[in-house]
Image (cartoon, rainbow, N blue to C red):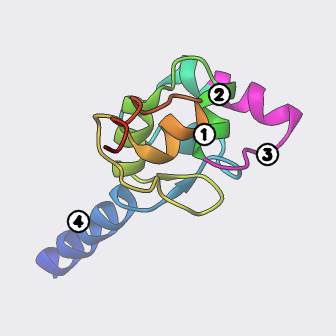
Amino acid sequence: MFRSILAAALAALAFNAFAAVDVNKASQAELQTVKGIGPALSTKILEARKTAAFKNWGDLVDRVSGIGPGNAARFSQAGLTVGGQPLAQATPEKPAAVTAAKGERKAPEAPAK
């Protein structure tokens, strides 16, 4: 009996650790369950969300200081979503969806000969 209770408790913890947290719906406590989001950053997210819901990952990065492309990728991998969507190509280097939203441009291609 003890083993079945322990197994059920561990399964519940494992399920909660991987549950998606939507930035537009989450409470401060729920935001803080995402690895890397603490009290200060969750407060910034909630303050920015008061003006309007986040449209996409680029909007989140633009409106919340402390969240850049690298953090966005890490938060997405840890279960954070925007409008139920994870960050496309969630890699810590430079996610295309976020860099495009930030207005970064690719280096010009060499002219065709």
**Which residue does the numbered mark 4 point to in the structure image?**
10
- Going from the N terminus, do you reach mark 2 or mark 3 first? 3
Which residue matches tag 3? 53
Q: Tell me the residue at 44%/42% (across/down).
A: 33
Residue type for callout 3? Ala
Tell me the kind of residue under disc 4.
Answer: Leu
Name the foreground residue: 28 vs 2: 28
Task: Tell me the magenta residue range.
Answer: 43-56
Q: Amino acid at mark 2?
A: Asp
Q: Nearer the viewer, mark 4 or mark 1?
A: 1
Circle 2 residue: 62
Image depth: mark 2 or mark 4 in front: 2
38 to the left or right of 58: left
Look at discs 2 and 3 and give the one toward the viewer: 2
Give the CA separation, mark 3 to mark 4. Answer: 34 Å
Instruction: Report which quarter residue 41 is drawn in.
Output: top right
Q: Amino acid at mark 1?
A: Gly
User: Circle 1 sits on which residue?
Assistant: 58
Whether tag 2 and tag 1 are in contact, CB under 8 A, the answer is: yes
- Label 4 sits on a secondary structure element that is helix
Circle nearer the N terminus (3, 1): 3
**CA distance separating discs 2 and 4:** 38 Å
Dot 4 surroundings within 10 Å: few (below 14), some, or many (20 or more)? Answer: few
Q: Residues within 10 Å of mark 2 (few under 14, many from 20)?
A: some
